[in-house]
């Protein structure tokens, strides 16, 4: 399956829609919409306008209220928008009603993320995982969603669809596809399990974190190999494994898919085999974009996902990356404990120092600042693990109390 929604010749124009609860600040809503716009941009979609509405829960019929829906409808018709993207998942009935009202393509957050993964997947394993997740997600939403499939297989040229018979045919096609993809994925997973089993005698380190925090850049710096890194969400979908040696101490370093707010559950399910790289890791390197306004919220989201895959309690190095982009508001009271970068670092060190098996590093992968501090921390963690696995293993640098990494 290939992405057929955008081409280099056609740039689709979108309207973004989000709800804001009574307890949610305007600033938080803007952050969420900025992320949604970044997701759309990653798929090659241009944003024309964003709409928000204060509501505690979505309208069961149309997600937004009647008045707001009419406002969106007028804008879509006037500006000839191609797509309306909603920042939450839509029920099949909401999807059907919105398509009827707005007369254009409707995306919800999960479908947008799934399409990005589909576009980014390179290996057979990743492509199979994403296709499975996407088909599982589409199956209950085929009341009108069959038009998306129509574009993928040539289509009939009619916008309204060919009725119940066509929908039932689509359901059968998707069910058969899901069965085939599951069988294919089981076979691939067995091969991957055999490969991981062969690595039992070497320490495994996994890079984890929110999407677009710099994991792949750090992977490239540590492995000294050409690993793909880009300033886009989900630049890495496939797991990348490299052997790294720090001061004669070897380990395997894995770069995994980035996490994100409201990551589709079907995607987590399908990617569980890839996330086995995280589950089976001895040490986690949790990378954080400290320049992002909501970096602590991103830490929580990553930790929630790690908890879901039973990997939260592993020895962890918390890497606060992008220090070169960190800006502190000059209007903040100088007495405030985070009024300068140094005070923010002190505050974060105190906060996370007590965390179980957790150490902190503050660095910039882009400039290389404090890279040696990260190497030193990983080196000590890996060496300690080596000593657990191989009690007789001694290293001359550690034996003599020498730290080979100094800034």
Image (spheres, rainbow, N blue to C red):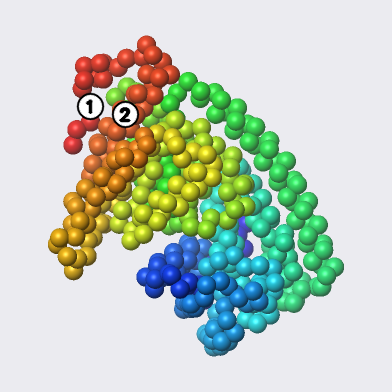
Q: Is residue 79 above or below residue 190?
A: below
Per the image, the residue denoted by label 1 is: 404
> Number of marks in the image?
2
In the depicted structure, whether residue 38 falls above or below residue 190: below
Q: Who's the residue at 52% across and 39% down the image?
A: 310
- Rendered residue at 58%/61% (across/down): 110
Residue 130 appears at what percent x and percent y? 61, 51
Please give the residue where the numbered disc 2 appears in the rendered image. Answer: 379
Question: Depth check: 50 or 44 in front?
Answer: 50
Residue nearest the viewer, comparing 88 with 78 = 88
Which quarter of the image is occupied by the N terminus?
A: bottom right
Q: Is residue 344 left or right of residue 142?
A: left
Image coordinates of residue 163 in percent, x first then y, are: 82, 73
Specify whether residue 185 is in view.
yes
The residue at the point 62 percent across, 68 percent down is 90
Crowdedness near tag 1: few (<14), some (14–19) or many (≥20) residues, C-alpha within 10 Å:
few
Q: Which tag, 1 or 2, sits closer to the chain's start? A: 2
Labels 1 and 2 touching (C-beta < 8 A): yes
Q: Is 333 situated left or right of 61 in this image?
A: left
Location of residue 36 in the rendering, given as x and y in whole percent from the top left corner:
47, 66
Q: Quadrant of residue 169?
A: bottom right
Q: Secondary structure at mark 1?
A: loop
Residue at mark 1 to residue at mark 2: CA–CA distance: 9 Å
Q: Residue drawn at (37%, 37%), measured in percent from left and top?
A: 356
Left or right side of 11 for 288: left
> Which quadrant of the view contains residue 363?
top left
Q: In this view, which residue lies farthest toward the right?
A: 165
- Residue 312 screen position, x and y as percent: 46, 40
């Amino acid at each position: 399956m290939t992405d057929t929604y955008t081409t280099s010749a056609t740039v689709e124009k979108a309207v973004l829609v989000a709800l804001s609860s009574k307890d949610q600040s305007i600033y938080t809503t803007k952050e969420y919409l900025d992320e949604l716009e970044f997701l759309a941009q990653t798929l090659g979609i241009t944003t024309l306008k964003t709409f928000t509405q204060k509501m505690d829960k979505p309208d069961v019929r149309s997600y937004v209220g009647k008045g707001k829906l009419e406002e969106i409808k007028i804008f879509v018709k006037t500006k000839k928008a191609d797509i309306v993207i909603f920042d939450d998942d839509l029920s099949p009935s909401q999807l059907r009603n919105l398509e009827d009202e707005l007369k254009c393509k409707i995306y919800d957050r999960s479908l947008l993320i799934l399409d990005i993964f589909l576009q980014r997947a390179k290996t057979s394993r990743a492509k199979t995982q994403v296709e499975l997740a996407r088909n599982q997600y589409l199956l209950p939403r085929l009341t009108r969603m069959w038009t998306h499939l129509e574009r993928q297989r040539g289509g009939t040229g009619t916008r309204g669809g060919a009725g119940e018979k066509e929908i039932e045919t689509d359901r059968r096609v998707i069910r058969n596809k899901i069965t085939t993809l599951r069988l294919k994925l089981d076979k691939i997973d067995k091969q991957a399990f055999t490969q991981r089993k062969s690595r039992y005698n070497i320490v495994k380190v996994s890079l984890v974190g929110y999407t677009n925090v710099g994991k792949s850049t750090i992977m490239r710096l540590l492995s000294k190999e050409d690993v793909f890194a880009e300033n886009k969400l989900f630049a890495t979908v496939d797991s990348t494994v490299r052997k790294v040696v720090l001061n004669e101490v070897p380990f395997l370093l894995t770069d995994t898919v980035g996490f994100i707010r409201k990551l589709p559950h079907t995607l987590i399910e399908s990617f569980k085999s890839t996330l086995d790289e995280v589950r089976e890791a001895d040490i986690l390197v949790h990378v954080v974009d400290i320049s992002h306004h909501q970096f602590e919220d991103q830490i929580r989201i990553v930790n929630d996902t790690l908890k879901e895959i039973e990997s939260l309690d592993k020895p962890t190095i918390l890497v606060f990356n992008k220090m070169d982009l960190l800006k502190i508001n000059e209007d903040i009271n100088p007495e405030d404990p985070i009024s300068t970068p140094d005070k923010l670092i002190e505050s974060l060190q105190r906060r996370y120092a007590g965390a179980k098996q957790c150490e902190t590093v503050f660095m910039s992968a882009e400039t290389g600042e404090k890279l040696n501090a990260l190497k030193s921390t990983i080196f000590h963690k890996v060496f300690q693990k080596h000593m657990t696995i191989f009690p007789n293993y001694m290293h001359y640098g550690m034996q003599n109390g020498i730290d080979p990494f100094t800034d």
